[in-house]
Structures are given as C-alpha cells and as structure tokens.
Image (cartoon, rainbow, N blue to C red):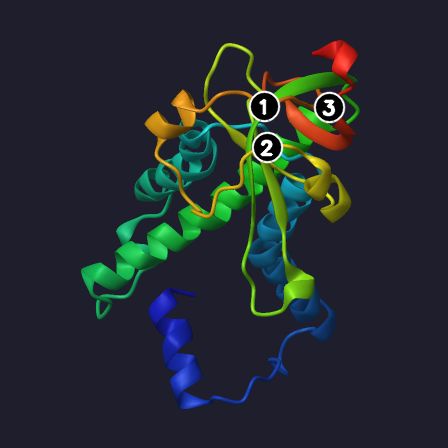
Amino acid sequence: MTFGAAALGRRNNRKFHFDPTRPLWLQIVKLAAQMCALLGGGVLSLVSMFKYPMLLTGTGYLIVFLGPIALGFVASFFFIPKRWFTADMSVFVRLQARLGLGALGAAWFIGAFGIVNGYATPVAVQDAPMVYKRTTTPSDPKQMGFYVGTRVWPSSRNVYEVVVRRDLYDRLDVPVVKALHIPWQQVGAMPDRGLLRLTVGQGRLGINWLNGVVGEAPPASR
C-alpha cells in the first residue's frame, strides 16, 4: 500500500478497523511490528542517551546525531523508489516523508551505536577541570537543574556540562554564569577552578561516556 492509498483509506473511513477477510492474529502482529518500527528507534535512542551519555563536543553531536539523519534521507532515494508514492503527492510531501523515514532509521542507528559503544565497557576515574556552574530557570523551583561546565577532554578547551546534585552544586567554588549559551571563545579563555571527579566509561567504539559524578576532587589530586 502506498502513502496516498493509506491516506485515502483514512479519509473514506476514519474509524479504525481490522480487515474481516484476513486472519486477525496476523493483522495484530503486523500492526505491532509497524509500531515497533516507528517507536522502537526513539526508545532505543533514549535508553542510550540516559544510560550511556557520550562525551561529545558540539561538532561531535552534529556528526553522531544529525549525520545519520542526512544519510538516511539520501539513502531513501536509492532504496525507496518514486513509484512507492502516489502521483497526487506533491514533491514537498514526498521529501517530508523521506526525511521522516531517514530520521526513523537514524534513531535506530544512534540508539544501537550508543549501547554498543557503552555496554559492559570498563569505567575509570577521571578528574576534570571545572570552569563554571549554572542552573536552569523552570517555573517550578523543584524542577531546577544544576550543571557544571567541565573540561573532560585533556587536549581540548571545550566544555562538557555535567548534571550534579544540589548539595554538590552549592559546595563548588566556581563562577556562576546565567547564559544558557556561552561563546566558544569566551569558554576557552575562562580559567580552570578546581577539579570534579567523574567516572568515565571507555567506549569500545572510541567515544567515552559519562558513568557518574563522584564529587569534588580532594586538594591532593590538584
């Protein structure tokens, strides 16, 4: 069935129903498989991001998260022929459909990549220099988040924001910033102020991931 035929079926009969001429169990299995294909990639990506958050710079995020979407969009022109779409669909709608399919495929790839990179990999202690700290400003103070900008890459002046507990945030003697986004040049020029002790997973695909926050590193390690 093409996109156009499916849309026409919804216009003619908006009430969902199973086809009485086909086995019910087979229709349920196919429906469940389609739902898994649509939602499974997003779930897998969320599990990957919360369980094995990769330590990426801004450029790294573009490559890992937006790169697969662009590749999926381009791949759709090779694997999904034009005849798959009905003739009454505009070019813009077909492009949207291809982009959506590319995003769905990218979600599966990103989730699988993050889990393969982080699952059952060794974890080491790392003391990262602190640069600043900030909070979010939600309408409900109980939902406030607390972040510390750290230099987790020894050879780089880039900053990775780590979520910390409220009590640890209050104890850290580092400058407080209000801006959500700080220009890279300004961040690179800011001095280091103490060390934050982290546990970092050694990703098997070459990208380390944040396992947890231990606390402020003792003075002897500075």
Q: Earlier in the sequence, mark 2 or mark 1?
A: 2
Crowd rating for badge 1 (residues with CA inside 10 Å; few <14, some 14–19, many 20+): some
Secondary structure under the numbered disc 3 in the rendered image: strand
> Label 3 amino acid?
Arg
The residue identified by callout 2 is: 174
Residue at disc 2, secondary structure = loop
Residue 157 image point, x, y percent: 46, 18
Q: Are marks 2 and 1 in contact (CB under 8 Å)?
A: yes
Q: Nearer the viewer, residue 186 or 79?
A: 186
Q: Amino acid at mark 2?
A: Val
Q: Position of residue 15 (x, y in %)?
A: 53, 89
Disc on the earlier residue, 3 or 2: 2
Q: CA distance from mark 3 to mark 2?
A: 15 Å
Query: Front-most of 157 and 121?
Result: 157
- Residue visible at 79% across and 29% down? 214
Looking at the rendering, in which quadrant would you find the C terminus?
top right
From the viewer's perspective, tell me whether residue 153 is left or right of residue 202: left
Where does the image place residue 213, in percent across and percent down from the top left? 74, 32
- Image check: 96 left or right of 48? left
- Quarter of the picture containing the N terminus is bottom left
Give the mark count.
3
Q: In the picture, residue 154 is in which quadrant? A: top right
Closest to the observer, 114 or 20: 114
- Mark 3 — residue? 197
Which label belongs to residue 91?
none
